[in-house]
Image (cartoon, rainbow, N blue to C red):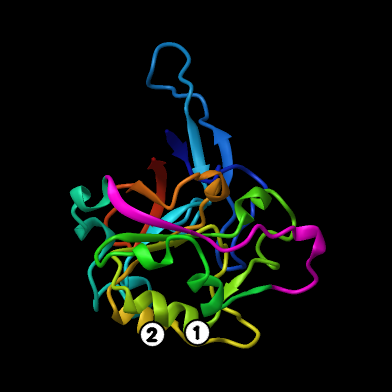
């Protein structure tokens, strides 16, 4: 079974606040130096965290203080052994505030005891169903500090989720310094995680081959 877990990039989609630009997909003007019509598009406003993306610790430490995305060998990103933790299946219509993912939530997931060092971990909450919802970003679940600390202790290659915003910006948990210091790749936000029927799968995540960046949009699939 092959499942695409990549969110679609389109006009009007969710986006991080200013100064992040908004995507605008528009046709290429007439090409005067070609005989006949040319059909192509300009992706205006595309940035390194548009849609589903992959990220290295340089996003936190700076491009001059860590390795960049182009430095990650592509063979490390193909068919990664992955454990899927299905935490919840939130209904956005029932929420008034952002729910927190706790350590207990992770420990009670099927597959939590099967995580192996150097593998990927993907946390699912059903949030990918709301990719096009107006409150997708501002009601996104977030991680509690102890939950991330437990994940760090598992020494994964990569942590991904279907969450749009991992941190609680109003009252920060403050886990990012430890997370990035642990040299873990960050991936997401994903869709369709709730459709993965097993706790073990293979994750392939291939970012655009762009220089001078810590992160870039990618295509991600799982096989199980």
Using a 10 Å C-alpha cutoff, classify the residue at mark 1 as few (fewer than 14 neighbours), some (14 to 19) or many (20 or more).
some
How far apart are the alpha carbons under marks 1 and 2? 11 Å
- Res 207 visible: no
**Which quadrant would residue 176 be assigned to in this image?**
bottom left
**Which quadrant would residue 96 be assigned to in this image?**
bottom right
Left or right placement of residue 28 versus residue 182 in this view: right
Q: Quadrant of the N terminus?
A: top left
| Residue drawn at x 60%, y 80% as measured from the top left | 168
Secondary element at tag 2 = helix
Q: Where residue 159 sits in the image (x, y, percent)? A: 39, 64
The image shows a total of numbered marks equal to 2
Give 165 or 150, whichever is nearer the viewer: 150
Q: Which residue is mark 2?
A: 177
Left or right placement of residue 116 versus residue 177 in this view: left
Give 217 or 77, whichever is nearer the viewer: 77
Of callouts 1 and 2, which one flags the residue occurring earlier in the amino acid sequence? 1
The image shows residue 84, relative to residue 221, as above or below, that is: below
Q: Which residue is mark 1?
A: 145
Q: Where residue 135 sits in the image (x, y, percent)? A: 73, 61
- Answer whether residue 81 is magenta in the image: yes
Q: Where residue 166 sits in the image (x, y, percent)? A: 54, 72
| Residue drawn at x 60%, y 51% as measured from the top left | 128
Using a 10 Å C-alpha cutoff, classify the residue at mark 2 as few (fewer than 14 neighbours), some (14 to 19) or many (20 or more).
few
- Answer whether residue 14 is magenta in the image: no
What span is in magenta?
79-98
């Amino acid at each position: 079974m092959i499942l695409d877990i990549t969110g679609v990039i389109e006009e009007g989609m969710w986006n991080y606040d200013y100064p992040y630009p908004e995507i605008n997909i528009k046709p290429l003007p007439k090409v005067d130096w070609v005989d006949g019509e040319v059909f192509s598009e300009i992706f205006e406003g595309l940035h390194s965290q548009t849609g589903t993306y992959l990220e290295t610790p340089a996003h936190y430490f700076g491009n001059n203080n860590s390795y960049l995305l182009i430095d990650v060998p592509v063979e490390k990103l193909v068919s990664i052994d992955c454990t899927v933790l299905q935490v919840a299946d939130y209904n956005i219509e029932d929420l008034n505030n952002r729910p927190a993912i706790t350590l207990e939530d992770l420990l009670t997931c099927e597959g939590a005891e099967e995580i192996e060092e150097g593998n990927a971990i993907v946390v699912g909450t059903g949030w990918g169903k709301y990719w096009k919802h107006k409150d997708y970003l501002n009601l996104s679940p977030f991680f509690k500090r102890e939950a991330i600390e437990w994940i760090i202790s598992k020494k994964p290659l990569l942590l991904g989720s279907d969450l749009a915003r991992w941190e609680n910006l109003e009252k920060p948990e403050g886990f990012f310094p430890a997370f990035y210091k642990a040299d873990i790749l960050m991936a997401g936000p994903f869709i369709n995680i709730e459709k993965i029927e097993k706790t073990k799968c293979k994750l392939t995540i291939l970012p655009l081959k762009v220089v001078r960046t810590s992160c870039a949009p990618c295509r991600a699939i799982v096989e199980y």
